[in-house]
Amino acid sequence: MSKNKQKYDEGSRTLRVYRGFADTRTLVPSEEVQGVMAMLREKKTSDGQEVSRVQYVFEDAGTAEYNHQALAFAGIETYVGDEKSSKPYESDDGTPGFSVREDFGID
């Protein structure tokens, strides 16, 4: 089972997407990433609010690590934590165990 919740911060124009997966080696679905990329390009959320940043906040560092490079390539920030407290994810080596461009439909 996965968790998916969004919160918008009007002051910083940041959309935060809180994600959790049962298996840490789970990618955010490519359709979801493409939708978020479209919001960033248009600078508006799906409900019309201005957005300048999108942060994916994962419950654990393993899932953040698995998704980080693909999200960074898409211009999306990766965080670890929850709604009360989160911090930017810092990659150890930046090398995922999959083909980023192909898996996210970017090619």
Image: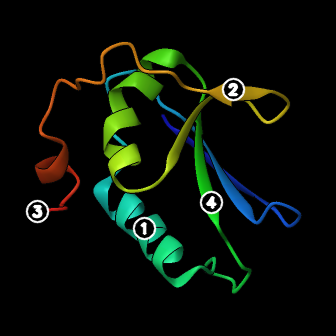
Horizontal side of 36 relative to 30 (left or right) equals right
Alpha carbons under labels 3 and 2: distance apart: 30 Å
Tell me if residue 9 comes above or below residue 45 in the rendering.
Answer: above
Q: Position of residue 31 (x, y in %)?
A: 33, 64
Q: Residue at x 47, y 30 (%)?
A: 21
Tag 3: amino acid: Asp
Expressed as whole percent of the image width and height from the top left, the position of residue 101 reads: 16, 51
| Element marked by disc 3 | loop
Q: Which residue is mark 4?
A: 53
User: Which residue position is annotated with label 3?
Assistant: 107
* Residue type marked 1: Met
The residue type indicated by label 4 comes to Arg
Provide the secondary structure element on which disc 2 rests: strand
Mark with earlier residue (4, 3): 4
Q: Residues within 10 Å of mark 2 (few under 14, many from 20)?
A: few
Q: Are marks 3 and 1 in contact (CB under 8 Å)?
A: no
Count of picture labels: 4
82 or 43: nearer the viewer: 43
Could one spot residue 22 in this view of the protein? Answer: no
Q: Nearer the viewer, residue 80 or 30?
A: 80
Asked if the residue at tag 3 contacts the one at tag 4, i.e. Cβ–Cβ closer than 8 Å, the answer is: no
What residue is shown with label 1? 37
